Image (tube, rainbow, N blue to C red):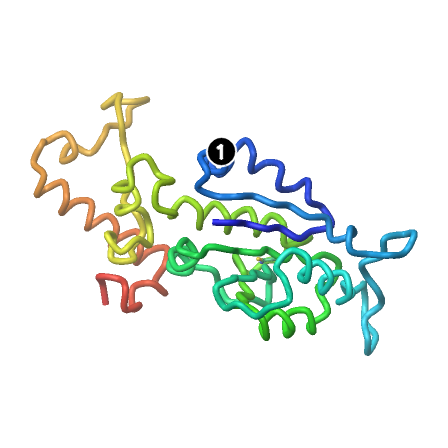
Amino acid sequence: MRLDYLSIFPAYFDVLDISLVGKAAINGLVEIHAHDLRDWTHDRHRTVDDTPCGGGAGMVMKPDPWGEAFDEIIGTESDPSVHVIFPAPSGTPFTQSAAAELSSAQRIVFCCGRYEGIDHRVIDYARSMWTVHEVSLGDYVLNGGEVAALAITEAVVRLVPGFMGNPESLAEESFSAGQDGLLEYPLFTRPVSWRGLDVPEVLMSGHHGRIASWRRDESVRLTRERRPDLTDSDSSGIH
Ligand SMILES: NC(=S)c1ccno1
């Protein structure tokens, strides 16, 4: 899997070198390429923004640098196997199932907007050429798309076959199919008693059936309490 990041702050992605994603890059599982969008400007000030048409506050990212960057990084041929991701508050909520789908992609290009956003024609052009995902991590506004691109990278790459030492650990995580799309149950380890707080007795019973039943009940309880929106989804085991 090749991952490209287009940003006016490409140094944001240096952190990938120290993460498990960086280890995956060393192992050849993924390729990481961060690019400075200003490399595709031609004026002395390396300008990437301009005032919004129709007025309004702030600045909008000009389409030209993006187009030239696309030409060089992705090419000028249409290819639906290339996934282009625009993180933005106006995007579709990013989910574990979206991460799972993207984990089989061979190419992902992250377009990290700044200022008030990117000229919409950039997204329209990308949509005419490749598979575009306008996604949001949540109902809040960041200063740009870089942090979201890092989070999406982690969610996707950890699902790439060969990344996790023990792929079975993925099966019991929140939102996983193995959990029926429910939130993960509470976890405990030694010591059995800590500051007057004990590990639930059932987990020390050695009775696998009772342990499985307790964990399921806890997942259902937590999901009902924290994410009632998930309790009616088709993927959840509770209705
Ligand atoms: N909520 C998201 S993903 C975002 C991107 C930029 N600002 O907010």
Three-letter code for the amino acid on which mark 1 is drawn: Ile
Q: Going by the image, does 41 lie left or right of 98?
A: right
Residue 76's image quarter? bottom right
* Quadrant in which the C terminus is drawn: bottom left
Picture residue at 62% right of the left edge, 50% below the top: 5
Closest to the observer: 225 or 86? 86
Picture residue at 64% right of the left edge, 55% below the top: 73
Q: Quadrant of ligand 1?
A: bottom right
Closest to the observer: 213 or 142? 142
Q: Is residue 30 above or below residue 91?
A: above
Q: Going by the image, does 57 lie left or right of 84?
A: right
Picture residue at 70% right of the left edge, 58% below the top: 69
Closest to the observer: 32 or 118? 32
Residue 234, position in %: x, y?
27, 69
Residue 200, position in %: x, y?
20, 34
Q: Going by the image, does 120 lie left or right of 178?
A: right
Residue 20, position in %: x, y?
46, 35
Residue 198's image quarter? top left
Residue at the spot of label 1: 26
Picture residue at 59% right of the left edge, 51% below the top: 4
Residue 21, position in %: x, y?
48, 39
Instruction: Name the secondary structure under disc 1.
Output: helix
